[in-house]
Image (tube, helix red, strand yellow):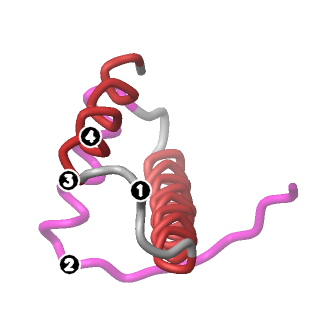
Amino acid sequence: MSNVSLSISVPDEMKEIIMQRTKQGYFGTPSEYLRHLVRQDIQRGQDIQEMENYLSEGIRSGRSRYAAEEIFDNAKKLVAKK
């Protein structure tokens, strides 16, 4: 993927945060920090879409044969494994 330049305006407070993150060594340049934030936003959007898909699938599947308590217990076990 090739890079292009993009000029943005931010309030002074945001500029200071961007510069602090860069100076703290988390990121080499302000551009790296902003790219990181965009990547996080893209991932968050994908995660939300995936969750919405799961919810829609669950709604379409109809009533469960399992009790709510059993479903939550199984979900907690799955989360604990990760």
**Of marks 3 and 1, which one's residue comes earlier in the chain?**
3
Query: What is the C-alpha distance between the residues marked 3 and 4?
Result: 45 Å
Q: Percent from the top left, x then y, of residue 23?
A: 29, 33
Write the residue at 47% across / 77% down: 59
Furthest residue toward front: 65
Write the residue at 29% across / 78% down: 10
**Of marks 4 and 1, which one's residue comes earlier in the chain?**
1
Q: Quick one: SS at disc 2?
A: loop
Query: What is the C-alpha distance between the residues marked 4 and 1?
Result: 10 Å
3 vs 1, front mark? 1
Seen in the picture, residue 70 relative to 47 is either above or below; the reply is above
**Of marks 2 and 3, which one's residue comes earlier in the chain?**
2
Highlighted magenta segment, given as a residue range: 1-26
Residue at image mark 3: 17
Based on the picture, tell me whether residue 20 belongs to the magenta stretch: yes
Q: Nearer the viewer, residue 72 or 41?
A: 72
Q: Which amino acid type is shown beneath numbered disc 1? A: Arg
Q: Quick one: SS at disc 1?
A: loop
Residue at image mark 2: 11
Based on the picture, tell me whether residue 81 belongs to the magenta stretch: no
Write the residue at 20% across / 53% down: 17
